[in-house]
Each structure stands twice: as C-alpha cells, then as structure tokens.
Image (cartoon, grey):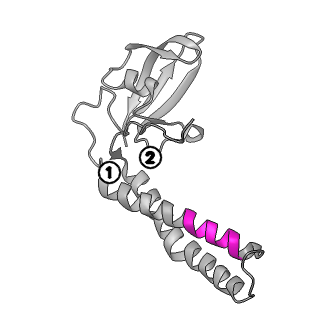
Amino acid sequence: MGRYRPPRPKGSNYITPEGESALRAELRQLWKVERPQVTNTVHEAAKNGDRSENGDYIYGKKRLREIDSRVRFLGKRLEAVTVVHDIPANTAKVYFGAWVDIEDEDGELQTYRIVGPDEFNLRENKLSMDSPLAKALLGKSLDDEVVFESPAGRRVLLITNIRYG
C-alpha cells in the first residue's frame, strides 16, 4: 500500500471581498508576527547546544515548516482567486455571494450565504459554492423548490428569500 493519493479536484476560484481580506490578514499574521517569533525561539534554542533533545528547537523547526507551507499556499491562492465585487443584475435569482433563506419539509428556516471554497464556514452559515446544496440553489429563484441529495437522503427545500450585500 503506497502513499499515493489522487489529486483533489480543484475548487472554484471565486471569493468575496471579505474572504480575500481574511486570507490576506492570515498571510500578514503568519509572515509578520508569528514567523519572526518562532524564528527567534528556534534561534535561542539552537544556542543551547545539543539540538537532538531540545524540544523548543525540534518543535520550533516543525512549526516553521508549517508556517512556510501555509504562506506558500496563501500566496499562490491569492494570485489565483477572482474577487467578486459586483451584485448581479438579476437579484431575484441565487448567484455567488447571495444570502438565501430556505425552509425545509419540517418548516425549519435556515439562512446560508453562498461563498467560495476558501471561506466556507458552517458555524457562520457560509456555504461553499462547490457543495451539493449550493449547487442545487445556484440559479434558482424565489419560491422555487430545490431537491438535492444529502448524506441523510433526499431533501426538498423552498427558497423563501434572496438578498445581496
């Protein structure tokens, strides 16, 4: 059994202005604040001599590799994304960046915002546009019924409100 894993399918390259600023803030935090602190810790730990049993040195180097990896990823990702600033001409349909209120078969109301894969967060009700629910919602209008397959089975939802901004 090898370590090979097939490449993951690429997500969409769209991002909201808020998502872009969050990624830029994370990049700035890692590069300007966290990396200099860890570098200083590793430098001080290296002065102590034997590095093979020096926890600060070993874990500091590991953290530096993690930071550098994330910085490389964020730099490449920020070059590749397309920031969507504009509100669509037809605000009666669900497009990228929309807040969508949906009602399920039990009458429960939920609100989701359709965002890019880099900024989805279900705790904040931000739904990736690559998710099955978002794919089912995109292009639909107010009062449309949406049918999609969830892990729990087939679900039918009703779009009760669409808003932007």
Residue identified by numbered label 2: 118
Residue 60 magenta: yes
What is the quadrant of the C terminus in the image? top left
Mark-to-mark CA distance, 2 and 1: 9 Å
Name the chief secondary structure element in magenta.
Answer: helix
Q: Quadrant of residue 133?
A: top left
Determine whether the residue tagged by mark 1 lies in a helix, strand or loop.
loop
Point out residue 45 in the picture as x, y percentages from the top left corner.
71, 83
Magenta part of the protein: which range?
Answer: 57-66
Q: In this view of the protein, which residue sits in the foreground, 49 or 69?
A: 49
Q: Marks 2 and 1: CB-CB under 8 Å?
A: yes
**Left/right of residue 160 with respect to residue 53 in the rendered view:** left
Query: Residue at the location (57% across, 35% down)?
Result: 1
Q: Which mark is residue 81?
A: 1
Residue 114 in the image: state x and y as whole percent. 41, 35
- The amino acid at mark 1 is Val
